Image (cartoon, rainbow, N blue to C red):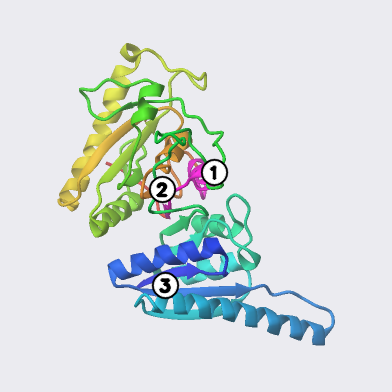
């Protein structure tokens, strides 16, 4: 793989946000950008009409690419540009084989059709050969804190400003001496502003952890290791008394502490902190996206983060998350 960031562009405002994020990252790392714009391969029975349609589609894709190239080069970033015919997801997945990072907007238009989570962003996150950053529609690096209009943190909202339906039921503890705090206290104090968040699966280590640590090192930001364990009583909307869950909590916190030690050994300059929650992983992680600079996820997980090719938790976070989210391919290993 080359020191290149792959960016899917389609001219939409969300695509431009993703491009701007990639431009900043390229400048920080001194990497180049590979800008890719696609147009669909559509069969038309009349060859004359078909040729005219294909030409018009290519010209539109080229115009989008030219604008994106100028936007990047005006910021001093080296670029290479590609216009290609075909399915946008397949085209980007193929390019991801030779790049170190891919960036795409959460929703797009035409070649990057989307809903709450676009088909291209979800497909690329699931199948990319390199880490993929999905930039949500409403991302604003200058306003990551949630406020309720009175200067205080309000209920989580999605990228369209609507109140999220994902309401967490969880405890939190940041170290062995502090007992888990109940929902209201945890929510009021839950802020990861200025931090890189990595979702850690019950003491697992793997590519996602190390990508997150590298991002923290490159950007000079703290790394927050967030682990979530399911409440033993099941989905009842409440948690058992602390005295009944302490041994399990201590065991999980010990696993998380070992991961912290491993990170410190490899990245001594990165300040890492453990955060152990009891509750639903997707709900907790969606809340971290309300304030975090970046949330890093694996494509698959075990235990608290179950999944298939793209795990159910990762899918939920990508759908509802507000901050940029990085999905890293590869399996975890036990620490």
Residue on which the image places disc 3: 98
Does 289 sit left or right of 12 as displayed? left
Q: Tag 1 or tag 3, which sits nearer the N-term?
A: 3
**Does any portion of residue 128 appear in the rendered image?**
no
Element under label 1? loop
Q: Is residue 323 above or below residue 103?
A: above
Label 1 crowding class (10 Å Cα cut-off): few <14, some 14-19, many 20+? Answer: few
- Image spot of residue 47 (x, y percent): 81, 85
Q: Is residue 86 above or below residue 164?
A: below
- Write down the region rendered in magenta: 308-328
Residue on which the image places disc 1: 161
Of tags 3 and 2, which is closer to the observer? 2
Label 2 crowding class (10 Å Cα cut-off): few <14, some 14-19, many 20+? Answer: many
> Closest to the observer: 125 or 150?
150
Residue 20, numbered circle: none
**CA distance separating discs 3 and 1:** 37 Å
Element under label 2? strand
Q: Tag 2 or tag 3, which sits nearer the N-term?
A: 3
Q: Name the residue rendered at 48%, 72% in the picture.
A: 95
Q: Name the residue rendered at 22%, 47% in the picture.
A: 263
- Image spot of residue 88 (x, y percent): 59, 68
Residue 316 counted in the magenta span: yes
Q: Is residue 120 above or below residue 147?
A: below
Of tags 1 and 2, which is closer to the observer? 1
Quadrant for the N terminus in the image: bottom left
Residue on which the image places disc 2: 297
Q: Tag 2 or tag 1, which sits nearer the N-term?
A: 1
Does 250 sit left or right of 130 as displayed? left
């Amino acid at each position: 793989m080359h020191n290149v960031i792959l960016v899917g562009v389609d001219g939409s405002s969300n695509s431009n946000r993703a491009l701007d994020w990639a431009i900043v990252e390229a400048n920080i790392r001194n990497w180049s950008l590979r800008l890719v714009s696609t147009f669909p391969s559509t069969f038309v029975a009349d060859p004359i009409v078909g040729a005219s349609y294909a030409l018009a589609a290519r010209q539109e894709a080229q115009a989008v690419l030219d604008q994106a190239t100028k936007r990047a080069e005006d910021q001093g970033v080296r670029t290479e540009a590609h216009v290609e015919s075909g399915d946008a997801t397949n085209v980007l997945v193929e390019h991801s084989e030779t790049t170190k990072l891919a960036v795409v907007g959460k929703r797009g238009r035409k070649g990057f059709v989307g809903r709450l989570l676009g088909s291209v962003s979800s497909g690329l996150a699931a199948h990319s050969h390199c880490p993929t950053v999905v930039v949500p529609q409403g991302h604003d690096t200058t306003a990551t804190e949630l406020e309720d209009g009175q200067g205080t943190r309000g209920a989580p909202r999605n990228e369209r400003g609507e109140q999220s339906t994902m309401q967490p039921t969880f405890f939190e503890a940041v170290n062995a001496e502090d007992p888990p705090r109940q929902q209201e206290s945890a929510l009021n104090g839950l802020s990861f502003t200025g931090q890189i968040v990595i979702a850690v699966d019950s003491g697992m280590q793997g590519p996602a952890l190390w990508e997150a640590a590298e991002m923290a090192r490159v950007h000079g930001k703290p790394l927050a290791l967030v682990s979530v364990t399911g409440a033993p009583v099941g989905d009842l909307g409440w948690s058992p008394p602390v005295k009944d869950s302490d041994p399990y909590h201590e065991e999980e916190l010990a696993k998380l502490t070992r991961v912290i030690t491993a990170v410190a050994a490899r990245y001594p300059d990165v300040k890492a902190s453990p955060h152990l929650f009891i509750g639903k992983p997707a709900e907790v992680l969606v809340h971290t996206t309300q304030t975090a600079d970046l949330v890093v996820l694996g494509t698959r997980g075990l235990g608290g983060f179950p999944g298939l090719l793209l795990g159910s938790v990762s899918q939920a976070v990508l759908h509802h998350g507000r901050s940029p989210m990085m999905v890293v391919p590869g399996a975890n290993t036990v620490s």
